[in-house]
């Protein structure tokens, strides 16, 4: 009896074929765009101590309450597969003393993340994000630059029907006063609220703005708005960010109900959605997190960043896969003896060492089968190693020439340069 077939776990997927090459295009564009703007690549561990996320992302968030893949190592330490990238980047900033470098320190990543979510189209348990974080400056120009970069990346990946919503959550100080007002409003209308919202009045009242429960929505219509309660400095900061975005011709809507799901945000927050996606319309988002580094044990350090979902960019985008590299030389064998195979193998590696892209049949095909394979690959030259001589064919210009095997690479290179 045969064993049952094993499948990838729910909410995970294999990346192969065309998907792999469109992802390569996204990575190349992100690298070019972000590195030209002074962002350096960072790669943090796949798992971190659980405390990093409970302290950093916040106990009241969906991520920490119900979405983390947490395990215990043999020494009883609690580890968690990273559900997001900002807290790990801040941890690395503190751990490597990056506050001593010229500020802001700008870092970008393209990595996989893990959340125990209900899997559906556009929502997975292992997914990829491209992200960028700038630490050490509260200049509104850093906010604007960060937003412009994501706008450009989405445009370059031809993500359709993009909307950018923007708001400011104010500094922690101005927000705490506002939170009290909002709590009062929620308590006064408690009977109309969704149970989940009611349970979080004290923990995270702002999340009530995210609810799609009709009663809650009605209560939120008349709720006080954070944007009306910002202090003068926060208002000025927000106005400056908007002015710079206007100057860069980035379109946005100010949405006072935008609260992001993570506790660490302060001041600027933003979210990109695409109407080309279904229910999971969020493509990417981010904001300022001026208290996070300190909360993780580092010096007081402002920061801002974003993350965008790779799968969602590709679902909503229309970027062609990178063309496969052309095969310049195909080595075919006329005969099956071991000596000819060894000579063919040696030629293959000589060609590759000379910088040519070269392949040979590894499937034991007949000569006819090998020539068919070369044709399928679109190989420019085919060397057929026969008894005593090698024939080099030019598949584009036509024609062929007999020569000793050791002259093949030279002949291909010479013809290449003549073109
Ligand atoms: P967040 O860190 O929740 O703000 O997520 C940033 C972006 O990552 C979202 O806008 C999505 O594009 C993407 N994303 C978040 N969660 C998932 C998921 N479970 N599956 C696929 N993409 C996701």
Image: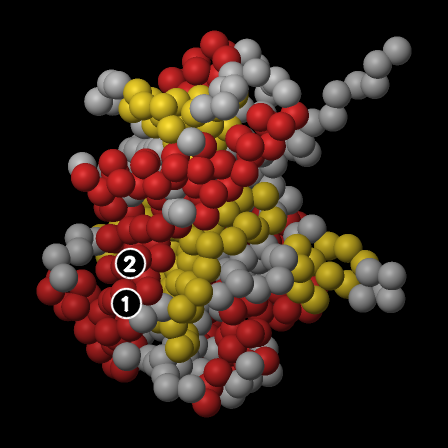
State the colouring used for the structure image. Answer: secondary structure
**Would residue 383 be found to the left or right of residue 344 on screen?**
left
Disc assigned to residue 33: 2
Residue at 32%, 36% (x, y): give it.
412
- Residue 388, given in percent of the width and then of the height, sits at 50, 23
Disc assigned to residue 51: none
**In the rendered image, the vertical position of residue 337 relative to residue 57, given as above or below:** above
Residue at 50%, 47% (x, y): give it.
128
* Structural crowding at the residue carrying mark 1, measured as other residues with C-alpha within 10 Å and reported as few (<14), some (14–19) or many (≥20): few
**In the rendered image, the vertical position of residue 174 relative to residue 162, given as above or below:** below
**Would residue 227 be found to the left or right of residue 188 on screen?**
left
Mark 1 highlights which residue? 37
Q: State the quadrant of the C terminus.
A: top left
Do the numbered discs 2 and 1 sit on residues whose CB atoms are within 8 Å? Answer: yes
- Residue 406, given in percent of the width and then of the height, sits at 44, 37
**Residue 2 showing in the rendered view:** yes
Dot 2: element = helix
């Amino acid at each position: 009896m045969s064993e049952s077939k094993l499948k990838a776990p729910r909410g995970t997927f294999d990346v192969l074929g065309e998907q792999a090459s469109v992802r390569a295009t996204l990575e190349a564009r992100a690298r070019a765009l972000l590195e030209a703007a002074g962002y350096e690549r960072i790669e943090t561990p796949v798992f971190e101590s659980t405390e990093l996320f409970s302290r950093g992302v916040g106990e009241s968030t969906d991520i920490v309450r119900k979405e983390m893949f947490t395990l215990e190592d043999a020494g009883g330490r609690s580890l968690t597969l990273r559900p997001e990238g900002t807290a790990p980047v801040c941890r690395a900033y503190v751990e490597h003393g990056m506050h001593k470098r010229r500020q802001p320190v700008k870092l970008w990543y393209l990595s996989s993340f893990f959340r125990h979510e209900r899997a559906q189209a556009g929502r997975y348990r292992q997914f990829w994000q491209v992200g960028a974080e700038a630490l050490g400056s509260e200049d509104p120009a850093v906010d604007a630059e960060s937003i412009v970069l994501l706008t450009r990346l989405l445009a370059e990946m031809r993500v359709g029907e993009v909307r950018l919503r923007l708001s400011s959550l104010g500094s922690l100080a101005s927000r705490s006063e506002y939170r009290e007002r909002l709590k009062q409003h929620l308590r006064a209308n408690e009977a109309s609220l969704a149970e989940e919202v009611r349970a979080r009045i004290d923990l995270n009242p702002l999340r009530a703005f995210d609810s799609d429960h009709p009663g809650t929505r009605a209560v939120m219509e008349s709720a006080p708005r954070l944007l009306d309660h910002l202090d003068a400095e926060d208002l000025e900061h927000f106005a400056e960010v908007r002015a710079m975005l206007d100057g860069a011709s980035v379109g946005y809507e100010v949405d006072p109900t935008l609260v992001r799901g993570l506790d660490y945000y302060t001041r600027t927050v933003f979210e990109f959605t695409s109407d080309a996606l279904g229910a999971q319309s969020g493509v990417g988002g981010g904001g300022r997190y001026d208290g996070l580094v300190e909360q993780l044990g580092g010096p007081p350090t402002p920061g801002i960043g974003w993350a965008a979902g790779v799968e969602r960019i590709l679902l909503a985008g229309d970027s062609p896969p990178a063309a496969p590299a052309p095969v310049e030389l195909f080595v075919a064998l006329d005969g099956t003896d071991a000596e000819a195979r060894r000579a063919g193998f040696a030629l293959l590696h000589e060609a590759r060492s000379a910088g040519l892209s070269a392949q040979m049949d590894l499937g034991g095909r007949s000569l006819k089968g090998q020539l068919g394979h070369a044709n399928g690959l679109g190989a420019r030259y085919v060397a057929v190693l026969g008894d005593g001589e090698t024939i080099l064919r030019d598949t584009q210009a036509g024609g062929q020439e007999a020569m000793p095997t050791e002259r093949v690479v030279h002949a291909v290179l010479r013809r290449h340069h003549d073109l």
